[in-house]
Amino acid sequence: MLMSGGVTCAPGTGEWITEPLRCVQRLYEESAALPGWEPKVTNYFQEKIQENQSCWVPSLNDVPLHYLKPNSLVRFRCMVQDMFDPEYYMGVYETVDRSNNARALHLGKYRDVADCKPQQEVDINSSKTVTAERQTFYCVPVPGESTWVKESSSSQAKVAPSTSYVPNRQKRSYDEGDEHSATPREQHTDVSEANIPKRHEMESQKKPKESASAISAPMDLNFPLPDEKGPACLVKVYENWDNFKVNDVLEVFGVLLVEPCLSVINEDRDPLSACFDPADSMDTLEEQRVHSPPTSLVPRIHAIIVQKLHHNNPLIPSSVCETDESKQCLASFMAELCSVRSELLGFLTHALLGDGLAAEYLIFHLISNVYARRDVLPLGKFTLNLSGCPRNGMFTQHLHRVVQQLVPTSYYLRMTIENMNSLRFIPQKDYNANRLLSGILQLSSHTSLLVDETLLEQGQLDTTGVRNVTALGNVITWQKVDYDFSYHRMEFPCNINVLVASEGRSLLPSDCQIHLKPQLVPPNMEQYMVALLSAVQPSLLNKFRIYISLLQMMDYSISEDVTKFVEDDFVDMRKDDPQSMSAEDLHRLLLVARLLSLSSGHGSLSRERWQKAKQLESQRKSRLQDQKHFGGNEL
């Protein structure tokens, strides 16, 4: 079956995808007299999604916007980049038929534009109007999402030629005239904008118009990372929006709205529509442009179902251990976990030029996770400094490509003087546009950040550069980013796995330093790495990806008898050589022992694994001592 938007849908799918608003209206009419009709809508669509699988719902992540039918059900996997002010809208409104004065009630939920026939008009003074509240999230594709995640998560509702529909909503730039053309107001009264933002600093006098150049300036979609692609969306959330926060990763199922009349730059609006527009209460034209951008660039999704994703690995259930099916899959995978670990260790050993010890520590890094916070101290983080890397940066670029194949989200940061002095790392509040300007460190949880320090050359860091280095240090040490609100800083906790590649010891702090000791020198690094990735079967790569994501979420504990054994062992080590084991060394050793246990599929520490962790740490320290007076490797 073909949706009229030229998208192939599952056989047997009905109007719940193609005409979701009709389904909502029917449920409203059936239950309007009874309390609690709204949960029935959510339950109805949840059941439909479970019955038909969510992959049959067209996804904005992989289907071009101009191939999607307006007012159809879509899904969008995204990160909350900003939260706008809550707004009021007409949840229920009454229309009057001009030909016979007949009145009718309509549902305004999940809409931006009133559903009126040509002879009907909205009675804005009706006593039956019901005002409701909703929240608007500005959402962007998950920053740094790996290609394999996008391919595995792609909708089965693929773009296909349709004989019944020719898409006419081609992508336009912000200043194309037809985007701003007026539409018949009898059919397009702006109900979503019958809303009044909660900010009450509304000016009583009309603001002066700003220059045409400000109007036609390119629209900044505010992606955190450079060169990111994909749609940004305004997601309208109707229930439980307090459960979500900035940087959360969401999967949204909702009604797609693409209405040219919603563009704020529309000089030809009639007085009725203009009086409903919240943009008129905004302080600057820049704020209006940001909060009411053209829907061809920033479409609206009226969310019916919003799910917070604790991970975005499509190969494992979104809620591990919550269903019998997911428990069964988990048990099946755990049975072969040791063999998967062995294969992964071999793969990473080759990627690290034959260095098996560094590969062990890289596994620990990849499965690390901030599992709790004690006061301000994040527990579980394991920032790894891989020193001894070649100077030219080619090795670290290929290493990042390897990491990209293993984790759902990652980013390669070239730590050059120019980048440190010019890039914005910390999100910053723009009060003129009333929005949060994104920064490189506005990343979702479990993102792997590879910082390439081998590219750092002599030069002077300016104020911005020093601030960016400090921000990186705060992420590594405290797992937090201090967002800049001009008059104050606001602390946002994060969970970012930072891997620092450097020639010598890094300028940045770290939880552990391992010096690379190559056992082979490839004549051509690029050919070597390409051959390595090509040699791995896709099925084995998927097992590596499942392994890393599952172990990040695995519980861990230490029994009382093992705790007593560790304490006694620490006392004995201090007794033999007080300088050999500090409190910091003990903390690192406990962390290595935890990650070693988890990497083997064990949720608790044993005496054997404690001894194994001590051996690994002894080898690591011995290597650092040997390399103390030497620089990086020349490859």
Image (cartoon, rainbow, N blue to C red):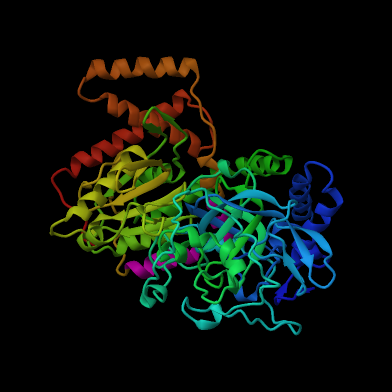
Quarter placement of the C terminus:
bottom left
Does residue 87 appear in this view?
A: yes
Q: Nearer the viewer, residue 273 or 287?
A: 273
Q: Which of 68 and 572 is in front in this view?
A: 68
Q: What's the magenta region?
A: 525-545
Does residue 632 appear in this view?
A: no
Q: Quadrant of residue 520?
A: bottom left
Residue 136 place in picture, x, y as percent = 55, 54
Which residue is painted at 49% across and 64% down in the image?
A: 535
Q: In which quarter of the image is residue 627?
A: top left
Quarter placement of the N terminus:
bottom right
Q: As displayed, is residue 1 above or below residue 235?
A: below
| Left or right: 324 as drawn, with respect to 496 | right
Q: Nearer the viewer, residue 376 or 552?
A: 376
Which residue is painted at 47% across and 46% down in the image?
A: 445
Q: Which of 624 and 312 is in front in this view?
A: 312
| Left or right: 190 as drawn, with respect to 597 | right
Magenta segment's dominant SS is helix
| Left or right: 16 as drawn, with respect to 205 | right
| Left or right: 512 as drawn, with respect to 294 | left
Residue 218 place in picture, x, y as percent = 40, 74
